[in-house]
Image (spheres, rainbow, N blue to C red):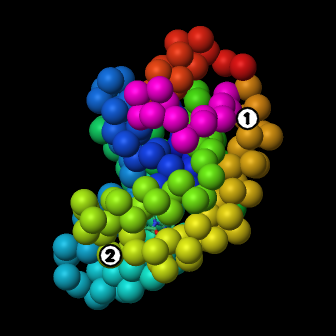
Amino acid sequence: MKIIFFGPPGSGKGTQAKMLCQKLNIAHLSTGDILREKLNDNDELSLQLKKIMSSGNLVSDNILNQIISSKLISDSCMKGFVLDGYPRTLTQSEFLLSFSKTKNISFDFIFGFEIHFNIVKERIVLRSEKEQRSDDSIDVIETRLSKYLDETLPVSDFFADKFSQNYFKIDASQKVSEIENNIMKIIENGKN
Ligand code: AMP
């Protein structure tokens, strides 16, 4: 099962991706998690990444495309995956679509998490207290949300149009368990 999650920061897609991957026994490809792990390397790249990520800006498309292309052909993704946080720009989406075509990878389900930004801001402030993420402060979240609107929402809309049979909107203001049930029902029922 090959799945893509789109949604603004704080929409709960990471939580849902984690649960779904456990349930389906597939790989969770969270580019945010992968990049945060790289921050521990303490090399030149990690210093650059730290600066970009803590300001709420996006890391370069080249870095992301390299990370994802090597993951997608790795053994860990053989049974399937959830892409969580990628593609986030039109350049990334073009890369993903051409890469997946050459590797014969097709996407079974694409979920677009939708939520009012006021709810997102409240959630992120709470998360910052729990997880101590440097990019979860209220001023940085404004940058992350505007990046989402400018760069990622057009990609999500493009996928909704191109893959209308496999694209499903999710009301992400619901409870975690309700969202989980929605997603499972859609997967059990199949395409639109
Ligand atoms: P996330 O945990 O998905 O909110 O990602 C945390 C941060 O990692 C983002 O604010 C970006 O700086 C960076 N990041 C994650 N995924 C991507 C991506 N696909 N393209 C560019 N930057 C990314």
Q: Earlier in the sequence, mark 2 or mark 1?
A: 2
- The CA span between labels 2 and 1 is 35 Å
Q: Residues within 10 Å of mark 1 (few under 14, many from 20)?
A: some
Q: Which residue is mark 1?
A: 163
Question: Residue at (45%, 46%) from the top-left corner?
Answer: 12
**Quadrant of the rendered structure where residue 8 is?**
bottom right
**Quadrant of the rendered structure where residue 81 is?**
top left
Q: Is residue 10 left or right of residue 108?
A: left
- Disc 2 or disc 1, which is closer to the eye? 2
Q: Which residue is mark 2?
A: 134
Q: Amino acid at mark 2?
A: Ser
Q: Is residue 89 left or right of residue 132?
A: right
Residue 12 magenta: no
Q: Vertical placement of 141 versus 161: above or below?
A: below
Instruction: Decide which of 160, 81 is in the foreground and name it.
Output: 160
Image x and y of residue 13, in percent: 46, 45
Instruction: Decide which of 164, 60 is in the foreground and name it.
Output: 164
For label 1, being within 8 Å of ligand 1 is answered no
Instruction: Decide which of 70, 31 is in the foreground and name it.
Output: 31
Question: Residue at (39%, 79%) from the top-left corner?
Answer: 54
Q: Amino acid at mark 1?
A: Phe
Image x and y of residue 69, in percent: 46, 54
Q: Residues within 10 Å of mark 2 (few under 14, many from 20)?
A: few
Quadrant of the rendering where the C terminus is positioned: top right
Residue 69 visible at all:
no
Residue 118 visible at all:
yes
Give the magenta part as a residue range: 166-179
Question: Residue at (25%, 62%) from the top-left corner?
Answer: 131
Image x and y of residue 11, in percent: 50, 49
Instruction: Decide which of 27, 135 is in the foreground and name it.
Output: 135
Residue 90, disc: none
Q: Vertical placement of 46 versus 85: above or below?
A: below
